[in-house]
Image (cartoon, rainbow, N blue to C red):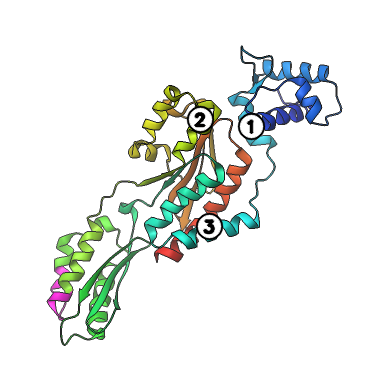
Amino acid sequence: MLLDERKRKILQAIIDDYISTAEPIGSRTIARKYDLGISPATIRNEMSDLEVLGYLEQPHTSAGRIPSAKGYRFYVDCLLAPPTISDQEILLIDRWYEAKARRIEGVFQETAKILSRMTRNVSLVLAPQMSQCVFKYMQFLPLDERRAIIIIVTDTGFIDNKVIDIPEGTSLSDLQSIAELINNRLAGLPLDRIKLSLLRQIKQDVVADSLIYKAALEVLGSAVSVDRKDRVYTGGTTQLLEQPEFRDVDKVKGLLSMLEEEQLLSDILHMQDTDHLLVTIGQENKFSGIQDCSVIQATYRVDGQVVGTVAVLGPTRMEYGKIIGVLGFMQRHLGDVLKKYGV
C-alpha cells in the first residue's frame, strides 16, 4: 500500500522526533511540535494505520510509537531531503587532515576519527587491499651529498622508503638510471606478482653499484611482502555507550567484541564497484551482531578505481541525513586526500 501525503508527513515527523529524543512519540507531541493542520485524534488514527502497515511499533511500556525497520527504510528511500554538508564543515575536515595526516596510514586513521566526530557513531575505514596495489614507480631523493632516500609508490598511494648511504663515486644520474631500469620492468605490475626471482633477474641488468641495488631490493622486498590482509581502521567505538540503546553494557558487549575482529569488519564492508551509498537497517544486516544497528557505507576511488570503503555503524535511530551527507562528501574527497598525502 502506498502512503498518502498525510501519512508520509506524520511518519517523517515521528522519525525525525524519535531520532532527536530517543523517546516514543505520541499523537499530542506531533500535533504540538509540527504544524500539520490536523487534530491529535486524526494523527492518532493515522499512527494506528501506520502501525498496522508495519511502519511503526508500539513498545509495551509506552502509549507512544517508535519507527520500525520498515519505517526507517521508507524514510531513507522516500522522505529524506537531499543530504548536504556545509562549507564550514568541509573547511573543518580539511584542517583536521592538515593538522594530523602526514603519511598514507595517517590519512586512514584521521578519516576514521573525522567520521566518528562528525556523526557521533562508530566509523569504519577499509584501506586499499595491498594485493590490489600496482607498482607505480621507484625514486631516489637526495638528502645530502652522502645520503639518499629510496621510495616505492603504488597506484593507491602506499609508500615504502629507506635511507641509504651513497657509495663514493656514485652520482645522482647513476641512481636515476637504476630507478628507471626498475620502473621499466615493474611499472603496472600488481605487488603480488612481483616475486624475488623477478627482482634478482633485474639485478643482472644493473651495471651500477651493487650496494645501491641491494638497498633497492630490500625496499622492494618489504613492499611486496607486506601483510596483504584488508586493514580496517575504526573510530568512536566508545561512543556506542553514550547511545540510549546501548547503555546496557551486557547488551553492547557482543558488539564491542565484534568491532575488534578485523576480518569480520572487512567482511561487513564488502566492496562494490559503485558510487551509490549502501544503507542496511536492522535485520537487513546479515551479521547477527549488528542486527540492532544500521550501517551506511560508501566506496571511494583513486584515479577512477574503487580501492576501499568508508562506513558508519550505529543504532537504527541514527541521523541518516547527516551521515549520508558526510559519507557522500568523504566518498568524493578521500581519493584526492590520499593522492595529496600519499603520492
Residue at the disc numbered 2 = 293
Q: Position of residue 295 (x, y in %)?
A: 51, 36
Q: Quadrant of the C terminus?
A: bottom left
Q: Position of residue 227 (x, y in %)?
A: 26, 50
Q: Give the secondary structure at mark 3.
A: helix
Residue at the disc numbered 1 = 19
Q: Is residue 286 visible?
A: no
User: Magenta stretch?
Assistant: 201-212
- At x 64%, y 22%, the residue is 66
Q: Quadrant of the N terminus?
A: top right
Mark 3 or mark 2: which comes first in sequence?
A: 2
Question: Label 1 crowding class (10 Å Cα cut-off): few <14, some 14-19, many 20+?
Answer: some
Q: Is residue 177 left or right of residue 101?
A: left
Cα distance between the residues tagged 3 and 2: 26 Å
- At x 61%, y 54%, the residue is 89
The answer to whether residue 215 is above or below residue 333 is below
- At x 53%, y 46%, the residue is 117
Q: Is residue 202 magenta?
A: yes
Residue 143: which numbered mark, if any? none
Number of numbered labels in the structure image: 3
In the foreground, 297 or 187: 297
Amino acid of disc 3: His
Mark 2 or mark 1: which comes first in sequence?
A: 1
| Pointer 2 with pointer 1, Cβ within 8 A | no
Q: From the viewer's perspective, is the residue at label 3 or at label 1 nearer?
A: 1
- At x 39%, y 35%, the residue is 259
In the foreground, 34 or 82: 34
Q: Give the secondary structure at mark 1.
A: helix
Q: Is residue 47 magenta?
A: no
Residue at the disc numbered 3 = 333
